[in-house]
């Protein structure tokens, strides 16, 4: 049995910013994911890989993992599914034979071209609760927090 010290506090998750950001991210991703999951049979991870490749054709799986912040094992499984479905292909880099470059196939580009407008439409509907000034402020605050978070380390060792 553990006894709490007088200075311990209860963590109020509903007010804890990292938790709130995570829940918001999950909620937002899940709503749009329903549309492309039903229509194209894509998971969130598979779509994120396709989105990254649509913007950055020819990058490696490691680079996809870095850009999405999704662990490499999940990326690897999702890449294999996309390869099996011929939505993307991988080729050995001519300069570095250890590296594989990933690109969307014609079928993958067709899916990408259909999901992108759906994504933008969802983003517009999601953000229509903000004024133009609030949107600029939100964008600025997210950019600032994103930049700052990369330098904050946990002291819980």
Image (tube, grey):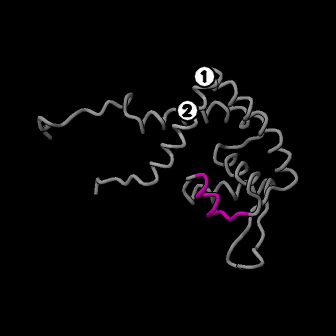
Please provide percent x and percent y for residue 48.
67, 47
Few, some or many C-alpha atoms within 10 Å of disc 1 (few <14, some 14-19, many ≥20)? few
Within-10-Å neighbours for mark 2: few <14, some 14–19, many 20+ = few
Give the residue at the far front of this rendering: 133
Q: Which residues are magenta?
A: 59-68
Q: CA distance from mark 1 to mark 2?
A: 9 Å
Residue for point 73% across, 50% down:
50
Q: Is residue 13 magenta?
A: no
Residue 133 left/right relative to 153: right
Rendered image quadrant of residue 31: top right
Q: Nearer the viewer, residue 154 or 133?
A: 133
Task: Give the vertical position of 71 relative to 60 (above or below).
Answer: above
Instruction: State the mark number for residue 58.
Output: none
Q: Position of residue 7 (x, y in %)?
A: 14, 36
Q: Position of residue 95 (x, y in %)?
A: 74, 79
Residue at image location 54% in from the left, 36% down from the top: 25
Nearest the camera: 93 or 2?
A: 93
**Residue that carries the numbered disc 1 in the rendered image:** 130
Look at mark 2 in the image and give the residue it sits on.
Answer: 138
Quadrant where the N terminus sits is top left
- Position of 72 with respect to 52 (left or right) is left
Earlier residue among tags 1 and 2: 1
Q: Are marks 1 and 2 in contact (CB under 8 Å)?
A: yes
């Amino acid at each position: 049995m553990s006894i709490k010290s007088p200075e311990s506090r209860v963590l109020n998750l509903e007010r804890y910013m990292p938790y709130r950001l995570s829940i918001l991210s999950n909620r937002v991703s899940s709503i749009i994911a329903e549309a492309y999951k039903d229509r194209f049979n894509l998971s969130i991870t598979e779509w994120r890989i396709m989105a990254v490749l649509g913007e950055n054709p020819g990058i490696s799986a490691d680079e996809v993992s870095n850009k999405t912040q999704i662990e490499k094992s999940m990326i690897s499984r999702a890449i294999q599914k996309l390869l099996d479905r011929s939505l993307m292909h991988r080729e050995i880099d001519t300069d570095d034979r250890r590296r594989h470059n990933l690109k969307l196939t014609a079928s993958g580009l067709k899916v990408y071209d259909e999901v992108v407008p759906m994504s933008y439409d969802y983003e517009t509907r999601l953000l229509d609760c903000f004024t133009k000034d609030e949107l600029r402020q939100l964008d600025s605050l997210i950019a600032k927090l994103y930049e700052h978070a990369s330098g904050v380390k946990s002291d819980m060792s």
